Image (cartoon, rainbow, N blue to C red):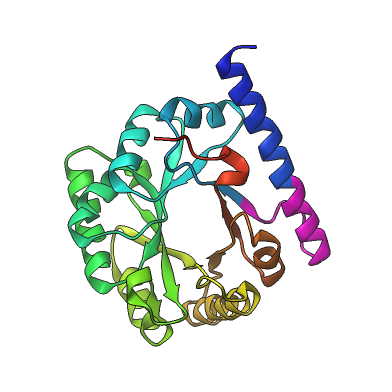
Amino acid sequence: MTDTAQHIEALRENLAAVRRRIAAAERAAGRTEGSVDLLPVTKFHPAEHVALLAELGITDVAENREQEARAKAEAIPALRFHMIGQIQSKKANAVARWAGAVHSLDSLKLATGLERGMALALERGERGEDNAVLPVYLQVSVDGDGARGGVPAADLDELADAVSDSEHLELAGLMVVPPLGEDPTPVFEKTRIMADEMGERLGRPLRLSAGMSGDLEAAVAAGSDVVRVGTDVMGHRPLA
């Protein structure tokens, strides 16, 4: 078996195993099977391996670093790349060129930068009219640690309103990463409530992006709509 065949078979098995976990969590929570989206996280894995996901029916993947994501997005047009890592404001224009969605919007300054970047990308033909709106998730900070990214709960409505008032951004929902060492269940449950309350205020349902390899069951039980899974899909990252 060639290296490519081995990689694609490993990915196939990993995807099936993670999907079984998600389906079991959906059943345990009384949710409709297939209601939770799996978003593979492909950071640090070479583009040739990431491209194999498209052959297995995957359409969307996630990356943490702008430069790496941009290079992969250019190399693999069959996949939509979501940005899930922190974004420096100076990188907003670059992210707007390639991102299929952003899960880590956490400031008014970044929202302004992404809106400006989208307008420039459209003007320059780097995005088409069928891709003229960028879905964004507001990253919630549950512990107020700005170094980890995220906006405090008290500032969520202001940021949500800024996104709603923009021309090229669309509020998709909320995203959260539980603090290290903290029980994720209350974090996920609280953020789900925030998303529902914000959705009621805005008059439409909002999604929750929460849960990774180690806590996806808790996230699904709490109402997550998107789980972001890296190692359990892609395998351990290659050694440098």
Please state which of residues 106 and 132 is positioned toward the viewer in this rendering: 106
Residue that sits furthest to the bottom in the current view: 154
- The image quarter containing residue 104 is bottom left
Indicate whether 184 appears above or below 240: below
Q: Position of residue 85 (x, y in %)?
A: 38, 57
90 to the left or right of 85: left
Residue numbers of the magenta segment: 20-37
Residue at point 42% right, 29% down?
Answer: 47
Q: Position of residue 4 (x, y in %)?
A: 56, 18
Residue at point 17% right, 40% down?
Answer: 124
Indicate whether 65 appears above or below 149: above
Residue that sits furthest to the top in the current view: 1
Is residue 104 among what the camera can see?
A: yes
Q: Position of residue 194 (x, y in %)?
A: 53, 80
Residue at point 45% right, 25% down?
Answer: 48
Which quadrant is the N terminus positioned in? top right
Which quadrant is the C terminus positioned in? top left
Q: Position of residue 223 (x, y in %)?
A: 66, 69
| In magenta stretch: residue 32 | yes
| In magenta stretch: residue 120 | no
Is residue 128 among what the camera can see?
A: no
Residue at point 65% right, 75% down?
Answer: 185
- The image quarter containing residue 226 is bottom right
